[in-house]
Image (cartoon, rainbow, N blue to C red):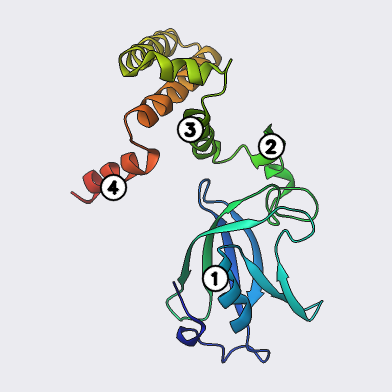
Amino acid sequence: MITFEELDTAKSSENLVPAIIQDDTTLAVLMLGYMDREALDKTREEGRVTFYSRSKGRLWTKGETSGNFLDVVSIAKDCDSDTLLIRVIPHGPVCHTGTVSCFASPETRKSVTEGGTEHYTEGFIRRLQQIIRRRHAEMPEGSYTSKLFNRGVNKIAQKVGEEAVETVIEAVAGNREAMIYEASDLIYHLLVLLEATGCSISDLEKELERRHKQ
């Protein structure tokens, strides 16, 4: 991971660097904080984001009072080595207002609740993938997703085929709302199939990018 010696702090009179926090699953930008050497070292050592709070004049671990910690996935620096990008798995809303991001506008404050945690509807497909992974790991009784995993790949693939046909039927008939409904079923079952076969959205993105470059 990045060390403080690699960073350029010349632009800051306080010897701080800005740290942009991004959700590793949805890719949403969550907040901006500042780090000094000690904050970055603590973040690297503990795997949870710690900032230097300019208002408090001390180190501040995000979530120390709310419990909404930010677990570190990766730390990168920008091309000028004066800004950090930290990708995280957030535990609950990040903003003190209760929204998932400090950059939430009135248009993007629409959210859904899963497990008591608020998330953007924007980028929810990646969040849904995360939920499906958790279902696969925990296999809670009574969960439809658990039942699909218990039935095996063949049955899940059959469901993907059925939902694809239903989506096509509604599209050809010009039924927009019905098509959206069926396409949503298709995407959900496809995500379950990807998980059951050890694949992910990232794998699809890599393949599509490879084709695009050609």
Q: Tell me the residue at 55%/56% (across/down).
A: 88
* Label located before the other in sequence (4 or 1): 1
* Residue 151 place in picture, x, y as percent: 39, 13
| Of labels 3 and 2, the one closer to you | 3
Kindly report the distance in space between the C-alpha atoms of the residues bearing marks 1 and 3: 27 Å
Q: Is residue 132 above or below residue 42?
A: above
The kind of secondary structure element at disc 2 is: strand
Kindly report the distance in space between the C-alpha atoms of the residues bearing marks 4 and 2: 30 Å
Identify the residue position indicated by label 4 in the image.
209
Q: Is residue 43 above or below residue 164?
A: below
Identify the residue position indicated by label 3 in the image.
137
* Residue 94 place in picture, x, y as percent: 70, 54
For badge 4, the amino acid type reads Glu
Residue 45 - label: 1
The kind of secondary structure element at disc 1 is: helix
Kindly report the distance in space between the C-alpha atoms of the residues bearing marks 2 and 1: 33 Å
Kindly report the distance in space between the C-alpha atoms of the residues bearing marks 3 and 4: 29 Å
Q: Tell me the residue at 72%/43% (across/down).
A: 109
| Of labels 3 and 4, the one closer to you | 3
* Label located before the other in sequence (2 or 1): 1
Kindly report the distance in space between the C-alpha atoms of the residues bearing marks 3 and 2: 25 Å
For badge 2, the amino acid type reads Ser
The kind of secondary structure element at disc 3 is: helix
Identify the residue position indicated by label 2 in the image.
111
Residue 166 - label: none
Question: Do the CB atoms of the residues marked 2 and 1 lie less than 8 Å apart?
Answer: no
Q: Residues within 10 Å of mark 1 (few under 14, many from 20)?
A: few
Q: Residues within 10 Å of mark 4 (few under 14, many from 20)?
A: few
For badge 1, the amino acid type reads Glu
Instruction: Please identify the quarter of the rendering in which residue 154 is found.
Output: top left
Q: Residues within 10 Å of mark 3 (few under 14, many from 20)?
A: few
